[in-house]
Image (tube, rainbow, N blue to C red):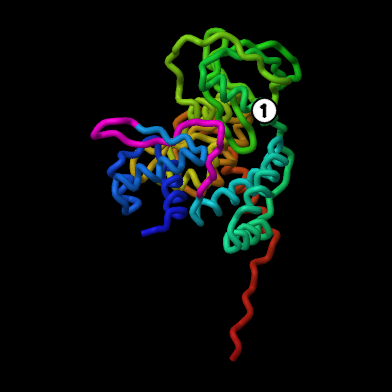
Amino acid sequence: MLDTSARLLRLLSILQGRPEWPGAELAERLQVTVRTLRRDVARLRELGYPVEASPGVAGGYRLGAGSVLPPLLLDDDEAVAVVLSLRTSTSMTGIAETSLRALAKLERILPARLRERAAALRQATVPLGGPAPTVDPEVLAVIAEACHSRHRLTFEYRRHDGRRSTRDVEPHRLVHAGRRWYLVAYAGDDWRTFRVDRIAGRPAPGPRCPPRDAPDAAAFVADSITTSVYRHRARVLVHAPAAAVAELVPATIAVVEAVDRDRCLLTAGADSLTFLATRLALLDHDFTVLEPPELITELRVLAERLLQAHRRSSATVPPLRHPAPPG
């Protein structure tokens, strides 16, 4: 049996695992009697941790909200996962400094063995830099709270052409796609997406929103950024499993849906049919264009251009001669 201090830490860790635990199950997990469990709960309360109890035979315990923040008890794998997540987020514009501060605090309290693993992760991982839109973490927090509490939001929004306007919307969900954040909201008379990095200043919360039948936020954003904003929209039957195609095509470029075990439907958009045809040629899988018919014509033009290039190249470049094997 664990000593009292170790058992209290173990109890606190278990209580953080889910909203409520039956008393008998907690006692069994700790390998103590129900009476000992009650004493341990009383000790936690004396230390300032708000452990709430529900009476009755089927009663249990839960860790309530309070003014004292309980210690974050993580096992080895959980601690390394948190460190890796914070290390990755330091490359995200807008929250890099916050992530570094949290990472430094966490690493100071890690045991020596985990501190070494965290240091190895920090030294071995290098983010690939590049331009990214700036997103204020406070703006994300305000939007997330409005989505959760179903309150309207008013904000200044900059369109892709640079024009600004005031938007009054009913927020639904935040979606993180690639290096950008999108707000899915009901605006005017329809559902729309808004890039969070184009929101100027801090959004102002308003009155509560009425309940609405909302779309799947992730699918809605995927459709918005891969097809809806482009001049041409293509639907292509790819003769390969959806998982294999999804590895080649990021969700920010196209939507991949399984048709059966061996085929999938790819939906993508572009302002250029030539670009779409070239992208499909790079799939390295057989495919059939369902729409638009203009894309089928563009594939023939691309095929003829490649065939001509092959003929010219074959006529001007001598074939490679492999050296004869040594005698």
When the figure is inspected, residue 284 is found, relative to residue 157, above or below; the finding is: below
When the figure is inspected, residue 36 is found, relative to residue 316, above or below; the finding is: above
When the figure is inspected, residue 142 is found, relative to residue 21, above or below; the finding is: above
Q: Is residue 213 left or right of residue 162?
A: left
Q: Quadrant of the C terminus?
A: bottom right
Whole-percent x and y of residue 217?
49, 26
Residue appearing at x 67%, y 53% in the figure: 312
User: Crowding at label 1, few (<14), some or many (≥20) Cα neighbours within 10 Å?
Assistant: some
Whole-percent x and y of residue 215?
45, 21
Residue appearing at x 62%, y 43% in the figure: 305
Q: Amino acid at mark 1?
A: Glu
Quarter-of-image position of residue 56:
top left
Question: Is residue 82 visible from the viewing direction of this image?
Answer: yes
Whole-percent x and y of residue 308?
63, 48
Q: Nearer the viewer, residue 283 or 218?
A: 218
Q: Is residue 168 left or right of residue 287?
A: right
Quarter-of-image position of residue 287:
top left
What residue sits right under mark 1 in the picture?
138
Q: Nearer the viewer, residue 145 or 171?
A: 145
Magenta residues? 54-73
Report the predominant secondary structure element of the magenta stretch.
Answer: loop
Quarter-of-image position of residue 6:
bottom left
Which type of secondary structure does the marked residue at label 1 adopt? Answer: helix
Q: Quadrant of the N terminus?
A: bottom left
Residue appearing at x 52%, y 12% in the figure: 190
Residue, far right: 162
Residue, far bottom: 327
State yes or no: residue 288 in magenta: no
Q: Nearer the viewer, residue 126 or 55?
A: 55
Number of marks:
1
Whole-percent x and y of residue 134?
72, 32
